């Protein structure tokens, strides 16, 4: 009898703790902490890896509509440094950081509340719930911040816009191409963000659980490092083709070749004219950026969450 009552008490206390965790994520202060820690973490990761993002965009825009030998990451880096100077590697940094604070805060900040909502609605917290929660938070975040992403890639491709600044370029886009131009590529961008967030967060979340169960690793810096590296690799493989399509659509006016109707048409044209490799242009640069960025983001986010009293992800 005593053992039955103690087991009931332990299960009840576990349920209370889980409900407290859920309430803290849904409360105004909890939501603010989730948003703040996530946004700061993504912004720091973005700022440190921004030069690789510039190189990635340049690689994705090589030989549009053509097959042929591609300039690789190293030679392109040297070429940009020689022709445009070191400052070119930080083109579009202001909109990139602005987007990171908003997009990153929403993307990571909405994940756990979404996960708790799914658990409340369906009574399950399995891998599918994590994927759905990540996809939802990623899609919502990018649909809101797409104009800043447009501005970022336009500035990254054209060093001549450096003197004008992001505000002047935003005004030019609206006056010449219309307000709808700020949502160019929002379809593939939303798909990419949903795929990126679901693969990144679900992989990180699930990897941590598996590593804790099957290895000597415990909650801490080494666990975060291994799990975030795995998440970076998985998300790069899944999102590289979508990212390339998104970049092409956003830069249509900046490119001589390539009048794409939508994301599917762009992917089809790339496959037809540039071959399957075309969809993975800049993939190594994507991983070189996304791998460290994912690691920095998750490790810093975990540290900040601990400082403000939030549970580990």
Image (cartoon, grey):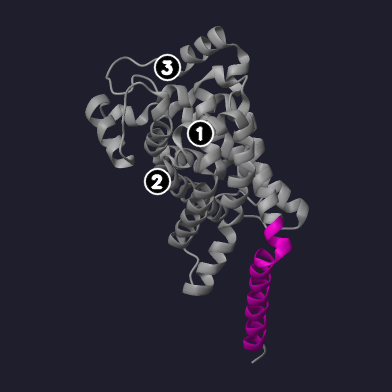
Residue 9, magenta (yes or no): yes
Disc 3 or 1, which lies upstream in sequence? 3
Is 171 above or below relative to 85? Answer: below
Is 203 above or below relative to 64? Answer: below
Instruction: Tell me the CA gap for discs 3 and 1.
Output: 36 Å
Q: Which residue is mark 3?
A: 72
Instruction: Judge by depth and name the residue closer to the eye, 85 or 118.
Output: 85
Can you tell which of label 3 and label 1 is closer to the viewer?
1
Q: Residues within 10 Å of mark 3 (few under 14, many from 20)?
A: some
* Residue 155: percent from left, percent from top: 54, 26
Q: Residue at 40% x, 14% y: name it.
A: 71
Quadrant assignment for the C terminus: bottom right
Quadrant assignment for the N terminus: bottom right
Instruction: Tell me the CA gap for discs 1 and 2.
Output: 23 Å
Q: Which residue is mark 1?
A: 175
Residue 293: quarter of image: top right
- Badge 3 element: loop
Is 220 above or below relative to 56? Answer: below
Residue 180: quarter of image: top left
- Badge 1 element: helix
Q: Residues within 10 Å of mark 1 (few under 14, many from 20)?
A: few
Q: Magenta region: which residues?
A: 3-32
Q: Which residue is mark 2?
A: 187
Residue 7, magenta (yes or no): yes
Can you tell which of label 3 and label 2 is closer to the viewer?
2
Instruction: Judge by depth and name the residue closer to the eye, 237 or 7.
Output: 237
Instruction: Tell me the CA gap for discs 3 and 2.
Output: 28 Å
């Amino acid at each position: 009898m005593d053992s039955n009552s103690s087991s009931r008490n332990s299960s009840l206390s576990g349920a209370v703790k889980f409900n407290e965790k859920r309430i803290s994520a849904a409360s105004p202060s909890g939501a603010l902490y989730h948003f703040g820690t996530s946004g700061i973490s993504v912004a720091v990761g973005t700022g440190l890896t921004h030069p690789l993002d510039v190189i990635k965009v340049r690689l994705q825009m090589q030989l549009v509509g053509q097959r042929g030998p591609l300039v690789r990451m190293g030679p392109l880096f040297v070429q940009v440094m020689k022709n445009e100077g070191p400052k070119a590697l930080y083109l579009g940094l202001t909109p990139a950081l602005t987007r990171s604070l908003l997009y990153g805060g929403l993307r990571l900040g909405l994940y756990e509340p979404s996960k708790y909502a799914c658990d409340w609605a369906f009574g399950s917290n399995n891998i599918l719930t994590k994927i759905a929660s990540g996809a939802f938070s990623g899609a919502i975040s990018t649909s809101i911040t797409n104009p800043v992403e447009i501005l970022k890639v336009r500035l990254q491709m054209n060093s001549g816009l450096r003197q004008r600044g992001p505000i002047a370029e935003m005004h030019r886009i609206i006056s010449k191409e219309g307000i709808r131009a700020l949502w160019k590529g929002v379809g593939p961008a939303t798909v990419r963000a949903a795929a990126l967030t679901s693969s990144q967060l679900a992989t990180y979340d699930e990897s941590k659980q598996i590593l804790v169960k099957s290895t000597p690793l415990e909650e801490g810096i080494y666990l975060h490092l291994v799990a975030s590296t795995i998440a970076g690799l998985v998300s790069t493989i899944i999102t590289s083709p979508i990212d390339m399509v998104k970049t092409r659509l956003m830069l249509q006016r900046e490119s001589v070749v390539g009048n794409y109707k939508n994301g599917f048409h762009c992917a089809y044209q790339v496959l037809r004219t540039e071959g399957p490799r075309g969809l993975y242009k800049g993939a190594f640069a994507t991983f070189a950026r996304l791998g460290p960025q994912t690691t920095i983001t998750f490790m810093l986010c975990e540290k900040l969450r601990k400082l403000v009293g939030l549970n580990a992800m």
